[in-house]
Amino acid sequence: MLAQESDLWQNTSVMGYVKDLINEHRGENYSLHASYINPQFAKVLHYIGFDRIFARAQGPFLFDENGSKYLDCICAYGTFNIGRNHPRVKEEIKEILDLDLPNLVKMGAPLLSGLLAKELINIAPEGLDKVYFGNSGTEAVETALKYARCATGRPRLLFCHGAFHGLTLGALSVNGDHHFRDGFGELFPGCTEVPFNDLEALEREVSKGDVAGFIFESIQGHGVHLPHPDYLKEAEKICRKHKTIFIADEVAHGLGRTGKWFGFEHFGVSPDMVLVAKSLSGGFIPVSAVLAKTWIYEKVFSTLDRCVVHSTTFGQNNLAMAVGLVALRILKEEKLVENAHRRGKEIREGLRKIAAQGELIKEVRGKGLMIGVEFGSPKSLKTKMGWTMLHGVNQALFAQAIIMTLLSEERILSQVPGHGKEVIRFLPALCIQDAEVEWILQAMERTMREAHRFPGAVWGAGKTLAKLAMKNVFHTQPKRTS
Ligand SMILES: Cc1ncc(COP(=O)(O)O)c(C=O)c1O
């Protein structure tokens, strides 16, 4: 006999189970990680002094066990655009859970995914009117690559040198950073790299007539490299001329990060497919979306028996859809896209002033709150000596020394975006205010002043890294196989 509704969960109370686990194992983060998850990563974090234990997070901030506040300028690679643990999203999640909605019925059409798709289409450029929901950025990329091949019947895919589009096998095949590709054998055939910002190379490949799609980031996140002002516009023309699908990977840029809803809007283009992910999650539930033109959708889902030819079990799950709806609403109501534009401009202007006071910052670049600072060789004898010493060991130790100093002295969590780059990247939450802008600028001013003192704390951090690099501590990658 079926149990009465009220009896169903009678003996399954686990209330407080996870909370108890957290209390019981407090402080074991790195030993557990080293034992069961990724010992190499745990080691690296330890060596560079990033093995902190954060206990709480709110808005643009992280708090360690002692309650000290840190400014998070990694933001899960640009995920926490609305800030961490936004109270409004928390409330909505609790409410949704209490509705006991019928999730993932599968042989049915969920309401919330329809509503979120409609919202996304409303903010996207005209002509993008079908949406596919997945669970991660790389899955959105996989979807776009499949769609492009299916819709055109062509085999080849183009991507830019230096591009990052994710790490599953299809996405890896269009990844322009060989560090990530090496060691995984032969990748997908027909994927060709073209130099970034080189229109002739692009046209040479596209004009062969067998290219299904060209995938690009409006700003290359790894290194924060901007396209030349006309590159994307001309690339779009080339793709249109040769009927190649023009695919904007907006996983990191989309939904406000660059100070516009989509990064490609800065460059006046109108892609055939647009991929979003990180920001849509509200920082809570993994989700991604591929916005595509109807003709592309119709080629893929061409007949009734192909109606689920591309799908995923957790796609359109209620919680992700609900949080996506709330995240979009918060971005709009709190005017976070506009704030990203304003704060980004303030930070870049401030950083350029700091650059002018010294000789180590080569360039400050970016759009909105995707900001890169590139360092370059100094001229003064002493600092040049330090620079040459570090570069004799590894191409990117100075930038690493800067992020180490920013964390240890200034409580700013930042990152070197990509391998072998003397670049640091700031991706704070889009809700930062005057105080956080000042935090970044004052921290960078002090850190760069220190970097001009040789020997000093920054060069000391660099020396530690150089010693580790000489012991080959960081060189744990397998050899190239292709
Ligand atoms: C531009 C871009 N595309 C794709 C991805 C992959 O997304 P995910 O890590 O969610 O798989 C990333 C991740 O950083 C990204 O920046």
Image (cartoon, grey):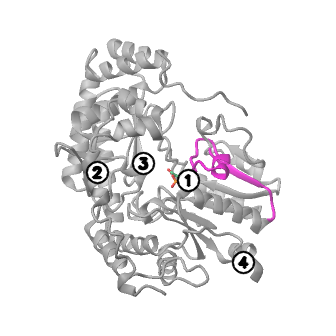
Q: Which amino acid type is shown beneath numbered disc 3?
A: Gly
Answer whether labels 3 and 1 touch (C-beta < 8 Å).
Answer: no
Q: Which amino acid type is shown beneath numbered disc 1?
A: Glu
Residue 210 screen position, x and y as percent:
82, 56
Is 171 covered by the magenta stretch?
A: yes
Q: Marks 1 and 4: which is nearer the front?
A: 4
Is 341 covered by the magenta stretch?
A: no
Q: Earlier in the sequence, mark 4 or mark 3?
A: 4
Q: Earlier in the sequence, mark 1 or mark 4?
A: 1
Taking the spot 34% from the left edge, 79% from the top edge, the residue there is 98
Q: Which residues are magenta?
A: 153-175
Q: Which amino acid type is shown beneath numbered disc 2?
A: Ile
**Local secondary structure at mark 1:** loop
Residue 401 screen position, x and y as percent:
35, 27
Give the residue number, with chain letter if any, for mark 4. Answer: 298
Q: Marks 4 and 3: which is nearer the front?
A: 4
Q: Earlier in the sequence, mark 3 or mark 2?
A: 2
Pick the residue in front: 66 or 252: 66
| Mark linked to residue 22 | 2
